[in-house]
DNA sequence: GCAAAAGTGTTGGCGTTACACCCATGA
DNA sequence: TCATGGGTGTAACGCCAACACTTTTGC
């Protein structure tokens, strides 16, 4: 059975970076640790991979256990494996990042796990190398959202173009031209009119769109240009 | 010391996908395994992470031990962690991929490790999930090389524009227009004239360029457009 | 009627493509 | 001198950024 018996075995952890959008800003789901080490400090949500569990399954499980969230966009970010990154014991951490729309998900389930949505501008210092992980996740989001229709994962099922624009402006912290943004997005063919209008507005009501799922899935990996290159530095 | 003592510990492996270019085609460095399991079969080069070794260091070490290669472009690709992927024992594999220029590196050191350069068109079946890993690495190469000056890692220090074009044609297996390609590349400011010419040619000798290292490093993450979108499918 | 937000139109510049021609080399 | 491959030029097109006007809504 064991050809590799003399090789070292390491702890393998999962850490999840969960990014959400509330219509105004990008937020991060963080937990106050209720176990040692670093009890009481802010941290990403994480856990350990089980002996008989695929990595991806493990990530979904940890996400579900700690937040109740399911059916969420998740992708692997990177592995962090510096020797001293967890001072308690050598641990290799596989980092996933997830995108969700805050309003559509039950925030009670989240609260009950000691988890809180915290806007990026108020991010506290996190344990271990979790700050670095969050930075990398934001880089990845900014990178991918400029080229692929990733941002839609952060919006509710029905959304308006101005909402979509607010999202992009929040991701890149830049202002975008309303007219150009609108034309650019409509020309992708990713948006389908629902026939409804956003009733929350106090002025002219914006048209509600939904995602063209077929096109979204088949053309996800194509290259788009959602953000002007000049804005990306 | 051990807050996590009851958690499972897993084998953590490194696998390296080494892609090279010989002036005509993209090749893959593979080894014939000289240990069990799967002795005698083709495989990526790999090894296990040591207890007191950073992941990145581990990747460099394994690359060096098995090929003698050093000072090479390496990036983390992805982690593979399905339960049954290595039938001998549950192993989580961190996959790195490296790009090198075949001619510039000592091929004797490579041969002495039972490693061989094999062109992609003749890739044999590999063990475990290594086929999937290679597929992913090629996807990544094609993705990044279209946007970032990654391809230069596959060329010798001095190169001609026609060589560069051959490289891109090999990566994407498409023909490119000579004139447009040349102008596009020259306009990036990434190429510096060496003043020399390629003496290998039997007809008009092409100008040898070298990479503008300053610009390469500072603008690596900027978005370029080395390959027409229409070619990328 | 007015303020505030949403929708639509136009223009000019720049980059990209698709093409043709000239130059250098060695057989 | 001819074949082969390398270097440069140009014109048409399309995309995109910059900007102005009209429409809807609630107070």
Image (cartoon, coloured by chain):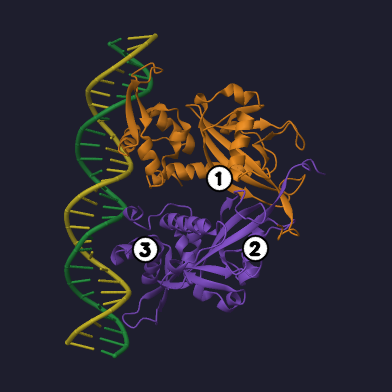
Chain colours: A purple, B orange, C yellow, D green
Q: Which mark is residue A173?
A: 3
Residue A70's place in the image compared with B117, above or below, is below
Q: In this view of the protein, which residue sits in the foreground, B223 or D25?
A: B223
Q: Mark 3 or mark 2: name the one nearer the start of the chain.
A: 2
Q: In this view of the protein, which residue sits in the foreground, A54 or A84?
A: A84
Residue on which disc 1 sits: B76
Q: From where the camera sits, is residue B59 visible?
A: yes
Secondary structure state at the residue bearing disc 2: loop
Q: Same chain for marks 2 and 1? A: no
**Residue at far front of view:** B1
Report crowding for label 3: few under 14, some 14 to 19, many 20 or more residues within 10 A (C-alpha): few
Chain at numbered mark 3: A
Residue A144 coordinates in the image, percent (x, y): 45, 55
Report crowding for label 2: few under 14, some 14 to 19, many 20 or more residues within 10 A (C-alpha): some
Tell me how far mark 3 sits from mark 1, CA to CA.
29 Å
Q: Evaluate if marks 3 and 2 touch, with contact meaning CB atoms under 8 Å apart.
A: no
């Amino acid at each position: 059975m064991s050809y590799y018996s003399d090789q070292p075995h390491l702890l393998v952890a999962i850490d999840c970076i969960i990014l959400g959008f509330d219509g105004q800003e990008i937020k991060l789901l963080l937990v106050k640790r209720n176990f040692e080490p670093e009890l009481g400090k802010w941290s990403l949500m994480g856990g350990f991979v089980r002996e008989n569990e695929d990595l991806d399954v493990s990530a979904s499980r940890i996400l579900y256990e700690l937040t109740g969230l399911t059916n969420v966009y998740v992708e692997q970010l990177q592995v962090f494996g510096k020797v001293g990154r967890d001072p308690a014991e050598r641990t290799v951490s596989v980092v996933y990042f997830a995108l969700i729309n805050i309003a559509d998900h039950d925030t009670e389930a989240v609260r009950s796990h000691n988890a809180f949505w915290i806007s990026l501008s108020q991010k506290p210092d996190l344990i271990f190398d979790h700050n670095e992980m969050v930075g990398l996740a934001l880089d990845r989001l900014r990178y991918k959202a400029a080229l692929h229709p990733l941002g839609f994962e952060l919006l509710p099922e029905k959304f308006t173009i101005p909402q979509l624009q607010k999202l992009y402006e929040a991701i890149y912290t830049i202002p975008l031209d309303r007219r150009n943004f609108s034309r650019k997005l409509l020309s992708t063919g990713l948006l389908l009119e629902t026939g409804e209008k956003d009733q929350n507005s106090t002025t002219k009501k914006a048209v509600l769109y939904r995602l063209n799922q077929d096109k979204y899935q088949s053309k996800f990996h194509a290259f788009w240009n959602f953000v002007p290159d000049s804005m990306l530095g």
